[in-house]
Amino acid sequence: MAVSDPPTTGPDWPLAIYEALKAAGVRQLCYVPDAGHSRLIGLAHDDPAIATTVLTTEEEGVALSAGAWLGGQRAVLLMQSSGVGNCVNMLSLLQSCRFPFLTFVTMRGEWAEFNPWQVPMGKATQAAFEIMGVTVFRLEHPEDAGEMAAASAKLAYDSDQPIAVLISQRMIGAKKWTEVK
């Protein structure tokens, strides 16, 4: 089983992202379960004003986000970098139809990675988004989370742009294999 070592102490960046999403009017949050997003997912689940949807695969989140927009709501997709490759074909929908899109991606295959299977997609994540026309921002410091989330939401929803915020692996903490007894 993989578990995370806690990151270095600092600002509660998941709370800052949550508050920025609330202020931006996000009403739907979809995700494939991910330990790096667990606090943000928990905050959304505890909020009756946000509908949460567990996905079986990440590309469903692109479609859900487009459908939410067509229905008059704003959605956000939470995923891990290993799932970005699953979305490439669906990302073409965003460009073709000019849908706004916002995703927060916890990075793997970077700082202190223990699993070699995570490295290739970790290296390709930013390029995969960019080749599909998605603007990419990197969140490296917890104290920047609220401002980054607010600015990204504004750009996505007010300008009909696809935006991905890549959250540094260092912010989520190193993962390691542990034996479950």
Image (cartoon, rainbow, N blue to C red):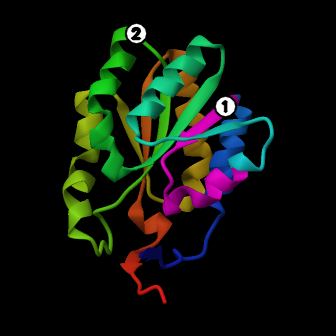
Q: Quadrant of residue 149?
A: top right
User: What residue is pinned by disc 1?
Assistant: 26
Amino acid beneath label 1: Val
Q: Residue furthest right?
A: 48
Residue at left 27%, top 41%? 85
Q: Position of residue 10 (x, y in %)?
A: 61, 70
| Placement of 1 over or under 143, stated as above or below | below
In this image, 114 relative to 14: left or right? left
Q: Of callouts 2 and 1, which one flags the residue occurring earlier in the amino acid sequence? A: 1
User: Would residue 133 be seen by someone viewing this image from the given angle?
Assistant: no
Q: Position of residue 164 (x, y in %)?
A: 42, 38
User: Would residue 112 be seen by someone viewing this image from the given angle?
Assistant: yes
10 falls in the magenta region = no
In this image, 47 relative to 142: left or right? right
Residue at left 24%, top 52%? 121
Real-space CA distance between mark 2 and mark 1, rounded to the nearest whole angstrom: 20 Å
Mark 1 secondary-structure assignment: strand
Amino acid beneath label 2: Cys
| Placement of 114 over or under 86, stated as above or below | below
Residue at left 32%, top 42%? 84
In the depicted view, which residue is nearer to us: 35 or 163? 35
In this image, 82 relative to 116: left or right? right
Q: Position of residue 103 (x, y in %)?
A: 48, 38
Q: Quadrant of residue 177?
A: bottom left
Q: Residues within 10 Å of mark 1 (few under 14, many from 20)?
A: many
Range of magenta residues: 26-43
| Placement of 96 over or under 146, stated as above or below | above
| Placement of 94 over or under 105, stated as above or below | above
Mark 2 secondary-structure assignment: helix
Q: Position of residue 35 (x, y in %)?
A: 51, 63
User: What residue is pinned by disc 2?
Assistant: 97
31 falls in the magenta region = yes
